Amino acid sequence: MSIYKRVLNAVLGVDLVSKIITVCGILGVLFITFFHVYIKNLDCSNICEEDIFLAFSVKRVGSILIYFFVGSSIIWHIWRYESEPKKRKVKMNVIAAMFLGISLVFYVGSHYFGILHLNNVHHEGMLKILESNKKSLSMINASDQSIENKNRVSNTFARMTFKFSGMKMEVTNLQGDIVVYKPTDEDLEYRRNMESTNVEMQQTLHMLKMETIRSLILFLGSIMVGYATVVARRFYKSRAS
């Protein structure tokens, strides 16, 4: 056997199924790599729907190929264990396949929990700022400062509160009366952008959560299917004998 064939068999595997599974894994990695390179070099000022569709279509195909590679690797190597004379090699393949499955779960899960943590920290920070603003507004409106100063400072705090939460606080107007803050067009535009960002954040969290659940189901399901096929084969062999 030539050196080229030995290297090819070592990388892809000897049997046809192993070759197909490995090729799918390699293609999946290439697709995901292409997605990250494409997104990194994308001109955000001149982006269009076709660019986004192409990028995420490539990512979806790459994810499917990697999921197929991990799941089928676990099932195939568990299936081969009893019939393969070289038990140690197959056992290492099973361990490697399961390690890939666990790595996939942790990789996807780490992204989800990382963004979830940042979102929670941001939310807690906003709550503290809002609570501080409420106390500051109450103190300013009840203080003995000049009406102009009350108006200026209370509007500053109320504007910040509205931008971050959408809440309209009470402020002191130039006549010295306590009124509800009226947001400007700039405030409304900022608030719309903030709400849009929050919606995108929640959508991203939901997507990553579902990806984490799918990867966990894939990992556990592949192990169960692999052992189920082994049990079924033993059953039919015992019935045949």
Image: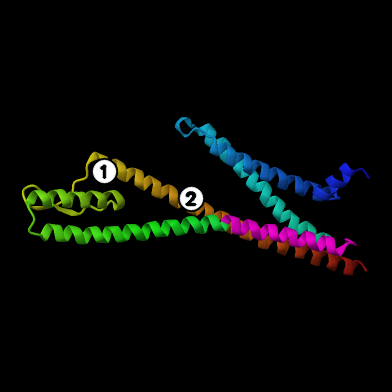
Residue 145, by quadrant, is bottom left
Q: On the image, numbered disc 1 is attached to which residue?
A: 187
Residue at 33%, 57% in the rendered image: 126
Q: Upstream in the sequence, badge 2 or badge 1?
A: 1
Q: Is residue 101 left or right of residue 119?
A: right
Residue at 61%, 58% in the rendered image: 105
Question: Where residue 49 sits: x, y (%)?
Answer: 50, 33
Count of numbered marks: 2
User: Farthest residue toward the top?
Assistant: 46
Mark 2, Cα crowd under 10 Å, few <14 / some 14-19 / many 20+, is: some
Residue at 63%, 42% in the rendered image: 33
Residue 54, by quadrant, is top right
Amino acid type shown at disc 2: Thr
Q: On the image, numbered disc 2 is attached to which residue?
A: 204
Q: Is residue 98 left or right of residue 159?
A: right
Q: Quadrant of the C terminus?
A: bottom right
Mark sitting on residue 52:
none
Residue 135 in magenta stretch = no
Identify the main secondary structure in magenta: helix
Amino acid type shown at disc 1: Asp
Q: For the magenta stretch, what is the residue range?
A: 83-108
Q: Is residue 145 left or right of residue 76?
A: left
Q: CA distance from mark 2 to mark 1?
A: 26 Å
Mark 1, Cα crowd under 10 Å, few <14 / some 14-19 / many 20+, is: some
Label 2–label 1 contact, CB within 8 A: no
Can the viewer see residue 69 in this picture?
Answer: yes
Residue 104 in magenta stretch = yes
Q: How is the image coloured?
A: rainbow
> In the figure, 28 relative to 84: above or below?
above
Q: Nearer the viewer, residue 12 or 50?
A: 12
